Image: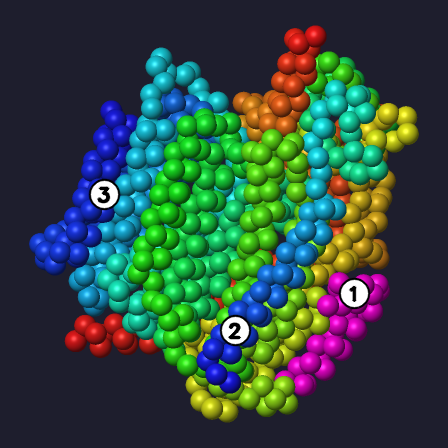
Amino acid sequence: MIPEFGHYALILALCIALIQGILPLIGAHQGRREWLMLARPAAQVVFLLLFIAFVSLAWSFYANDFSVLYVAEHSNSQMPLVYRLGAVWGGHEGSLLLWIFLLSIWTILVAQLSKALDEFMVARVIGVLGLVTSGLLLFVLTTSNPFARLLPAAQDGRSLNPLLQDPGLVFHPPMLYMGYVGFSVAFAFAIASLLSGRLDAAWARWSRPWTTAAWVFLTLGIALGSWWAYYELGWGGWWFWDPVENASFIPWLVGTALLHSLAVTEKRGGFKSWTVLLAITAFSLSLLGTFLVRSGVLTSVHAFATDPKRGIFILIFLSLVVGSSLALYAWRAPKSTMGGKFSLSSRETLILLGNVFLVVSAGSVLLGTLYPLLIDALHLGKISVGPPYFNSVFVPIMIPLLVLMGIGPWANWKNTDLLAIIKRLWIAGVIAIIAGIAIPLIMGEFTWLASIGFLLAFWVITSGCLQLIRQAKVGKPTRSFIGMQFAHLGIAVFVIGVTMVGAYQEEKDVRMLAGETVSVGGYQIQLEGVSSVPGPNYNAMRGTFLLSKNGASPTTLYPEKRSYFSSSMPMTEAAIDAGLTRDIYVSLGEELDDKSWAVRVYYKPFVDWIWGGCLLMALGGIFAISDKRYRMKLKRQAS
Amino acid sequence: MKPRHKRAFLIVAALVVIGVAALLILNALNSNIALYVTPSEVVAGKAPQGQAFRIGGMVKDGSLRRDGLTVHFVITDLVKDIPVAYTGILPDLFKEGKGAVIQGRLDGNGQFIASEVLAKHDENYMPPEAKHALEQAQKNGSNK
């Protein structure tokens, strides 16, 4: 009964979402107040229904109801409860349900927190979100119903892919989707403003915290995914330029551009059309990302065996969203693109330049991701575009962007004296150059790439420190200012991590017998032995390794090779000794003849700084959202 | 500076950035693309010379042989076979009789030296390129 309940709730949600999407928009257009007023209650009902649907699916997993096809395919009675619940979004149908459920959470938040906003604007924003919700609900109900029954019921489920049976599954998808979906709010604000013709600073102030919130979730989601891949996939990399990673990274780049451009629109009333275009693009790219992941057109870690109907539906939905919003944009976008006057040497110009770099880098990643599809569609053969492409295109674009990052915050709006900035910043330049030369020499090997990496990171850091000193002289910094400092510092920390790992990591694939020692990065790693250990739904071969440096007392590491009962697929669980300045990463390959094992040993200097940097960025975003001015304006408008 | 000039300057700056990026992209695409080739095409001599490429196909049953860390196996589209050598740790899902995609180059003796064996992360999932190779081979076989 419960699954039918959920299915029914989904169908009802579609009906109400259509009301939420159509009536308030018409009402706002024709000035019918009673239709406008439907927006909030409709959004609340849709949220409630989707909540019921989501809980029904979770209950089916909890109760091991294998008469539900989706449960039978992704769960198993032996699986621990936490992974059974995580499995709710472990496959195609459930993860789409999660997508829509999160969309309704964003909608309800907008509905509840926008009491001070003009009724017409709220109605339009909720209406646009309602249309998006309806489209996706239609998709789920027609092609990917998670409540479809399997009759007769299966004895037991097929179990979740062992790779996904990890705490990462519980956090990564919801975070990432929260970010993806969150850009729909910025999109809805943009469309609403185009519809009403009210593209002003107030609009930017409203959409800015929402955009920042989505960006924070996306940052955390991507970082979690990267960290998960690092410790779970057993090959010790943190980023593979996998198409699905790119699908999340492209909206992030555009979203970052949007954050900065919104700042100009809020403070100076400039770049209006550009900001709107970025908002539309960020959300369209999120949808494209969903299409790429869900349609199975790309070969990747996330590819599921799929049904072509789904790809076509999302493609049609995507072209409808992009087509109609671009048409609206062409029709209604303000003609004057520059907004308030500013000189060439001004904060506006620097932000615009940074925006160009971000958008161009997003474009280059997009091109590399879609290129194989394009070539295949044109019947020119099957190709793959590998990480070297992305590295050799993306990294050079980031260099000037980081240089700009050190300068931009010093510039004044409207007009600034670049010479005065250079006079203030020369010390940062000197420190950066010293760091760029000294650190590679200390690490023992000088490469230009490493040198540039450290130089840029220290350029951003020292510039930030100087900004803090200047700010301390003027007065108490705003939360926005602190947020910016954290976010930029995060980028610098991230760059240090990437540079260190890129230039100084050591990787060894070796063959080891019990008692043998291998050394990596100045550490000695000894294999004690490999023994068989049972787990809840798997059997593991567990290696015992002793890690020591210069005869100090050793740390023990236990990498595992698991074979799950429900699957013939073995799983590598790496063991990591993490530290502030380095990770030691050991994973078991396979048993070779004569009782020796293939073992993979990595020395990864400063690798945790990569995710630490992302955390700092997210923290910066949180500070920026909590800035007083958003709430003060709220109160003022309310009174 | 007049607003018109200012706008022109900004547009030119943006174009320069895009132009440089386009150059980088073209350059990188040229040297970093790997073509997918089926085993039959390799035997027919259609593989790119002196450049890395990818082969999709099945790992032939009973062909896996270990020599320390180096693994020898045969990749096939069920019509033609290509011997492969790879040094390193194979991904978890690498198995005889299953689909695989490998990247590398041919040595002088017709052996494929793999630099990368690609992992698929679901046991029921067949790499589309491997499937494509099998279908191609089957089609050509039935035509003859």
Camera-nearest label, 3 or 2: 2
Instruction: Point out residue A15 in the picture as x, y percentages from the top left corner.
Output: 20, 38
Stretch of the chain drawn in magenta: A425-452
Residue at mark 3: A17
Q: Secondary structure at mark 2?
A: helix
Q: Secondary structure at mark 1?
A: helix
Mark 3 vs mark 1: tell me if same chain: yes
Left or right, A617 with respect to A549, comes to left
Left or right, A50 with respect to B141, comes to left
Q: How many marks?
A: 3
- Which quadrant, please, contains the C terminus of chain A? bottom left
Residue at mark 2: B8
Label 3, label 2: how far apart the Cα atoms are: 46 Å
**Residue displayed at 28% across by 76% down:** A632
Instruction: Point out residue A387 in the picture as x, y percentages from the top left corner.
Output: 68, 47
On the question of residue A512 being in view, the answer is no
Q: Name the colour scheme.
A: rainbow
**Residue displayed at 78% across by 38% down:** B52
Q: Marks 3 and 2: CB-CB under 8 Å?
A: no
The numbered dot on residue A448 is 1
Camera-nearest label, 2 or 1: 2
**Is B42 drawn above or below residue A581 in the view shown?**
above
**Residue displayed at 74% across by 46% down:** B31
Crowding near the residue tagged with mark 1, few <14, some 14–19, many ≥20 C-alpha atoms within 10 Å: few
Tell me which amino acid carries mark 3: Ala
Tell me which amino acid carries mark 1: Trp
